[in-house]
Image (spheres, rainbow, N blue to C red):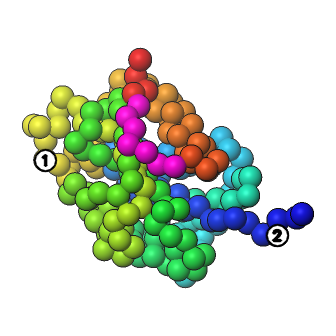
Amino acid sequence: MYRIGLQKTVLIIGLGNLGEKYAGTRHNIGFACVDEAARKLDFPDWTAKKDLKCLITQQTIADSRIIIIKPTTFMNLSGEAAQAIQHFYKISDADTIAVYDELDIPFGQIRARQGGSSAGHNGVQSLIDHIGEKFGRLRIGIQNDHTKNSDGADFVLSRFSKEETSLLPALLKETTSMLSEYMHGQPVIADTRSFIV
């Protein structure tokens, strides 16, 4: 007996802002994570889809089509791209996961969960406004000792410290591992992982 077609389509959304001004900032860690996962897992080069408001790469893993996107809108309008992609490819929130920075989680931790609020993250709020709140989350901690003494908007748009930058390869390796598990059919569960040993 032959199985015809793919069983499902999975959507992974990295949140960030395009442009050199934002490259390497804490707020762009979602972009960095999906860039690394796409590179390590041998996805094709990114392709611009103006009508879907994103950069996209995709491939088939097992019996699923895996689509990774980076919205080309600004962070606060990320939901427009998510909605366009979901409608075009008929993807549900249950098969969607967003990867983004989380100011309330310490640097060194990655937390996964299904659904929830935006916790004040404008990019996530845009996703909720456009596709609902039941999508999966991979939240990358960016909080450090300077967070409380900094303006939140300025802090997330600042670059990682020298020490943090030295630890980013470990972070990206761990998020790639978690995304690979998701691509291979593992559900998003309430999970906290530390990449700093």
Rendered residue at 47%/57% (across/down):
97
What type is the residue that disc 2 sits on? Answer: Ile
The residue where tag 2 is placed is: 4
Q: Are marks 1 and 2 in contact (CB under 8 Å)?
A: no
In this view, the residue in front, 13 or 151, is 13
- Could you tell me which residue is drawn at 41 percent across and 17 percent down? 197
Q: Residues within 10 Å of mark 2 (few under 14, many from 20)?
A: few
**Seen in the image, is 164 located left or right of residue 41?**
left
- Side of 168 where 164 appears, left or right: left
Residue 185: x %, y % from top left: 61, 50
Q: Is residue 3 visible?
A: yes
What residue is at 27 percent from the left and 33 percent from the top?
A: 106
Residue 19 in view (yes/no) = no
Q: Is residue 150 magenta?
A: no
Q: Is residue 194 above or below residue 138?
A: above
**100, above or below 166, in the image:** below
* SS state under label 1: loop
Is 190 contained in the magenta span?
yes
**Identity of the residue drawn at 41% across and 31% down:** 193
Name the spot of residue 6 as percent of width and height, x first. Answer: 73, 66
Label 1: which residue?
A: 151
Q: Is residue 21 left or right of residue 54?
A: left
**Camera-side residue of 75 and 181:** 181
> Residues in magenta?
187-193
Element type at mark 2: loop
